[in-house]
Image (tube, rainbow, N blue to C red):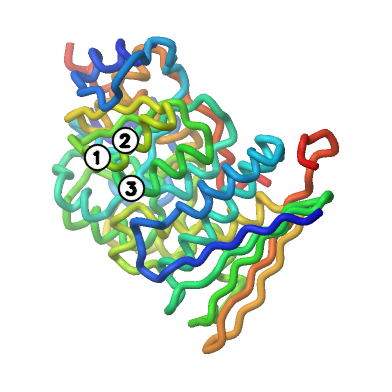
């Protein structure tokens, strides 16, 4: 799905100025806990989260996350929005719960990305 | 839909012992932040999380959720499992990520509505 | 030629938490370290930084040294120290205060993530004195740095 498709599907508000039409959201990971996000082993992931702390965008930068979906009506600060804009990471915010957002995206063929589980090594 | 049917349909591992799984599941809540779960979880929600901290049992008890699914292959410490068994909170485990588990549960519950 | 990067982390400074890791990763990429190694260094520093912020009484420092062989990261604080290192290294074990848990930190994976991303990892700690963590990320032979 494209970024715009997701904005429509989740009745979301885009937090990104400009053209995000080549951002393909096809792999996603949902978490509020950032350390688990850091165990992701696959790039080109879209992060679905309800955490709006400054760490989210820094983690996104370290991992080359390609997009961020904030759920539960959470909206990060303008500083974070501007920072993401500079990094070219499209973000959106939806009032839907994480459950609904994941449910809808999964139903539209967005797939999970690989995460090194706690038991691997 | 009954929790016991969700367990079968999603291939979940049941971690607790002697806990009744006949709870009604009407929706899901996916959240790793305990204060948010306390504020938002409804009775008959099935809680999906990667938070394995022992406080999940108390939060589940207070919110009266139908049960808790630990995703991403995460298994909490035995002490947490024992506590959940004692408090009669079904604790379940899934190998897949929260994203997948909620995707499947969402589909399951949506198809049940027709 | 060695290159050094150094960052101070202040206790409780949530706004800045993670900024050192993002800055370091960016610097490493600029000098030609390949993406995967820079990412690993970024993850190590992120977890180290967050630990200093959440647990270290007076914050601490993060240092990264780049040589032709490796990126060596040291994270140091002056207290309170870790009573049981084996327990602290157990995935999911966390002593994070409630304020941290509610902000998405304290999943109990910090030290584990650091170790997993290092080719070499050591941790020394004494209660009442402080903690020193040293991690090494080996460089790829074909990266573009020096």
Q: Residue at x 66, y 76 (%)?
A: C124
Q: What residue is drawn where x is 35% and y is 52%?
A: C104
Rendered image quadrant of residue A8: top left
Question: Between C98 and A67, which is closer to the camera in this rendering?
Answer: A67
The residue pinned by badge 1 equals A78
Q: Are the residues tagged 2 and 1 within 8 Å (C-beta)?
A: yes
Determine which quarter of the picture holds residue B43: top left
Q: Which mark is residue B32?
A: 3
In 3D space, how far apart are the residues under numbered discs 3 and 2 (Cα atoms)?
A: 26 Å
Looking at the image, is A24 positioned above or below residue B92? above
Residue C57 in view: yes
Q: Secondary structure at mark 3?
A: loop
The x and y percentages for residue A40 are: 54, 38
The residue labelled by disc 2 is: A82
Q: Secondary structure at mark 2?
A: helix
A69 or C89: nearer the eye? Answer: A69
Asked if residue B101 shows in the view, the reply is no
């Amino acid at each position: 799905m494209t970024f715009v498709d997701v904005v429509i599907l989740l009745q979301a508000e885009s937090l990104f100025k400009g053209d995000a039409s080549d951002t393909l959201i096809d792999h996603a990971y949902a978490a509020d806990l950032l350390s688990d996000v850091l165990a992701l082993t696959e790039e080109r992931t879209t992060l679905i989260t309800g955490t709006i702390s400054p760490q989210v965008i820094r983690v996104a930068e370290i991992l080359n996350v390609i997009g961020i979906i904030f759920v539960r009506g959470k909206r990060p600060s303008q500083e974070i929005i501007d920072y993401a804009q500079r990094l070219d990471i499209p973000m959106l915010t939806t009032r839907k719960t994480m459950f609904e957002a994941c449910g809808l995206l999964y139903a539209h063929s967005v797939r999970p990305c690989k995460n090194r589980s706690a038991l691997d090594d | 839909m009954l929790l016991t049917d969700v367990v079968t349909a999603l291939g979940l591992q049941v971690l607790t012992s002697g806990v009744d799984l006949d709870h009604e599941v009407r929706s899901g809540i996916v959240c790793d932040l305990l204060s948010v779960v306390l504020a938002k979880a409804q009775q008959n929600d099935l809680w999906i999380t990667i938070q394995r901290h022992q406080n999940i049992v108390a939060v589940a008890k207070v919110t009266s959720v139908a049960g808790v699914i630990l995703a991403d292959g995460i298994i909490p410490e035995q002490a947490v499992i024992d506590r959940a068994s004692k408090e009669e909170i079904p604790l379940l485990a899934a190998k897949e990520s929260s994203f997948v588990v909620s995707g499947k549960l969402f589909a399951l519950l949506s198809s049940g509505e027709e | 030629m060695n290159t050094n990067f150094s960052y101070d982390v202040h206790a409780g400074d949530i706004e800045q938490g993670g900024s050192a890791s993002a800055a370091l990763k960016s610097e490493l990429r600029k000098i030609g370290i390949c993406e995967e190694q820079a990412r690993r260094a970024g993850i190590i520093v992120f977890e180290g930084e967050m630990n200093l912020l959440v647990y270290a009484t007076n914050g601490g420092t993060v240092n990264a040294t780049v040589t032709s062989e490796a990126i060596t990261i040291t994270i140091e604080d002056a207290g309170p120290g870790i009573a049981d290192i084996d327990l602290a290294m157990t995935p999911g074990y966390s002593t994070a205060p409630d304020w941290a848990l509610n902000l998405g930190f304290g999943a109990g994976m910090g030290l584990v993530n650091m170790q997993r991303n290092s080719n070499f990892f050591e941790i020394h700690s004494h209660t009442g004195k402080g903690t020193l963590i040293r991690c090494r990320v080996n460089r790829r032979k074909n990266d573009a740095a020096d």
